[in-house]
Image (cartoon, grey):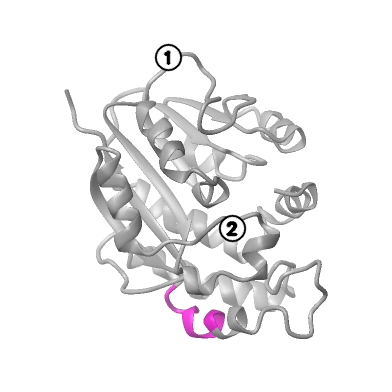
Amino acid sequence: MDPVIYDEMLEQENKHWWFLARRAIVSSVLKRIKLPANPKILDAGCGTGGNLRMLSECGGELYGFELNDKARGHAQSLKLGTIESGILPNGIPFGDTKFDLIGFFDVLEHIEDDKTALKAVVDRLASGGLLCMNVPAYQWLFTRHDRLHHHFRRYNRTQIIGMLKAAGLTVEFASYWNFLLFPIAMLVRLFDGIGYPKHHAIGAGQPSPLINAALLSIVSAESHILPHINLPFGLSILLVARKPAL
């Protein structure tokens, strides 16, 4: 991503409704996952480290990798785990360490050869290990917002489940989320680019505190639903998949 995107992420990841809601939803699913004692956990493409604290609540040893120097430096400053330079598909650090849980949150869409990158991540799972990942939904919603964030694509549920199965994983959970705001967001995305500065995407900035709180409340409500049912559509897809135990 462009350095300005990392700057925005650093500024917004602890207050913007989308980042907060994503963590609430992912956390609600992770709490239902049974991990071994003292698990090894990896945040693959950890960015500025916004998800490290959430992952640290699973216990065990926490690792992460990030290519961008500034983002990695901030992630390291949180002192929540071992963070090193790394890149997918062929530059994952930490030697031959295998991980019981890998978080892979909104990273795959940034990689041109997504199948090879996914295989590289799966190869680092321990026997019986779990991959928890999030990707943006629906290629027909691909807009200037995606191009500014250097996305190569968006996915649908059937497509990403097929990729996980082809990589040798058993999918245990797969649901769309950001369901309640979908109709509004769909219209906003379809009109992205009309009457707005070309260097900035709709939805990229920080909304007013009142609107931010309202959006957070609406989307976070899905965290009470998702552990129990799969939502039929939404702007993102959250999945949990397991590597077969040897």
Is residue 168 or residue 232 the one in the foreground? 168
Tell me which label, 1 or 2, sits earlier in the chain. Answer: 2
The percent position of residue 93, horizontal first and vertical second, equals 54, 20
The percent position of residue 204, horizontal first and vertical second, equals 71, 67
Amino acid type, label 1? Asp
Comparing marks 1 and 2, which lies closer to the viewer? 1
Q: Is residue 118 above or below residue 63?
A: below
Secondary structure type for disc 1: loop
Q: Quadrant of residue 28?
A: bottom left
Secondary structure type for disc 2: helix
Q: Tag on residue 19? A: 2
Amino acid type, label 2? Phe
Is residue 122 or residue 77 the one in the foreground? 122
**Can residue 62 be seen?**
yes
Distance CA(mark 1)–CA(mark 2): 31 Å
Q: Which residue is mark 1?
A: 96
The percent position of residue 225, horizontal first and vertical second, equals 32, 68
Task: Please identify the quadrant where the C terminus is shown.
Answer: top left
Q: Which residues are magenta?
A: 179-186
Q: Is residue 12 above or below residue 204?
A: above
| Residue visible at 61% across and 71% down in the picture | 143
| Residue visible at 55% across and 79% down in the picture | 185
Instruction: Indicate whether residue 149 is drawn in magenta.
Output: no
| Residue visible at 48% across and 67% down in the picture | 220
**Can residue 33 be seen?**
no
Q: Quadrant of residue 19?
A: bottom right
The percent position of residue 109, horizontal first and vertical second, equals 52, 52
Q: Tag on residue 23? A: none
Quick one: which residue is furthest to the front in this view? 113
Assess disc 1: are there few (<14), some (14-19) or many (≥20) residues with their C-alpha within 10 Å of its C-alpha. Answer: few
Q: Is residue 18 above or below residue 167?
A: below
